[in-house]
Amino acid sequence: MALKTSSCRLLFKFIHQGVVAPLAAQNALRSVLGCSSTRGYYNSGKPSYAGPGRAAHVRVVDLRSDTVTKPGPAMRQAMAEAEVGDDVMGEDPTVNELQKIAADMFGMEAALFVPSGTMSNLIAVMVHCRERGDEVIVGDLSHLHIYEQGGSAQLAGVHSTTVTTLPDGTFDLEQLESKIRHGYPDPHYPRSRLVCVENTHNIQGGRVLPLAFLQEVRALADRYGLSVHMDGARVMNAAVAQGVPPSAILQHTDTVSVCLSKGLGAPVGTVLAGPKDFISRAVRCRKALGGGMRQAGILAAAGKLSLQNMIGRLEEDHSNAKMFAQALLDCNPNLFAVDLAAVETNILRFRLQDLSLSPREFCDHMAQVSESEEAALGQGIQVLMYPHFGNSVRAVWHLGISPEDTQLAIQKMQFVVSQHVMENIRAQ
């Protein structure tokens, strides 16, 4: 309630002190950010600063993704001091330690350090689907299906069929069952081999898959002799949100891919984990894809620190995302639609209800700094976020964003709203 009152007072101040500037000069940022669409999901351009003369006064709050995190002093020191060897020969002690730590934490027999999550998911598909023409069942809004360039088909010769992704990131189990092929070796059809789930679900706003759903998927897969792979890029966020160890989630999957370079803050790397024979085959696939690294312990040292020291702090990211979501709801006038119950982790998706302000325009305004803003707020605040599909905006919290940064982002949002209100008043 206090935040809502503050928002109203700030809006009143902006209007009556005459510091609200017209919303013009958008072309430069629009050319960088571009328009979002149902097929584009979000754009990858980085907005430019308002101007070099004002850069010293600008506070940047980068909410584009948790991939923008940077290693801190302790992590850099661990990387500098890492004991290394040739990992392709299995002789890098730091890589081996990371893999052992990960396997134990995930409740898996073995693990493999891989350069990226995209490669890790592709390796999983290649190992589970051993013959060209095998089939994987994935959600139609899954990262593996949308963002990984169709690598399963392009590089592995594996066919994909999709099930509808529900708003909470789950599938309808009856629809999932209907997608399973039967009658192999009938020459007309591919052979169903694998079901992939995503936890947390990226496009659906960081949603956490319920444990009961995972248990049901596991039972269904077992009934038909299929494997289950989890794209667990942010599964640590899911574990923190549910208050359970990651092994409690991963007991329902055969394999998992866990990213170290998102909320956990490592600069590079993903861990792929599963049974020993799966990992043995995965080593061969990693080599074929060019992912065999030599003295990789320099990178694995950062990953070790991520798993050992960075999981507990994810709760702060979740809290900051909820704080911003609540501020959007409390905004007066009510420009934003937010399902607060759906803000479960560090990813926030919200919609704009005013048709005169598009997600792209809102992101443009959040990313630019004007003299009137500096006069009103005492500094320039540049908030970077992406227009997303479905008339929405996506913002992601991470270790580089403090509660103070979140409050600054709220102030900037309130200022942008005040400008929009004044522009509408002038247009009447």
Image (spheres, rainbow, N blue to C red):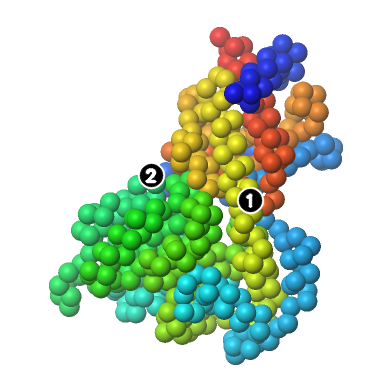
For the N terminus, give its image quadrant: top right
Q: Is residue 23 left or right of residue 227?
A: right
Residue under pointer 2: 167
Which secondary structure lies at badge 2?
loop
The spot of residue 115 in percent (x, y) is 58, 71
Q: Residues within 10 Å of mark 1 (few under 14, many from 20)?
A: many
Residue under pointer 1: 398
The spot of residue 164 in percent (x, y) is 31, 50
Q: Which quadrant of the figure has residue 77?
A: bottom right
Q: Amino acid at mark 2?
A: Pro
Separation of disc 2 and disc 1 at Cα? 23 Å
Q: Is residue 64 left or right of residue 233?
A: right
Q: Of label 2 and label 1, which has the lower sequence position?
A: 2
Task: Say above or below: 113 vs 46.
Answer: below
Q: Which quadrant of the figure has residue 302?
A: bottom right
Q: Which quadrant of the figure has residue 326?
A: top right
Q: Amino acid at mark 1?
A: His
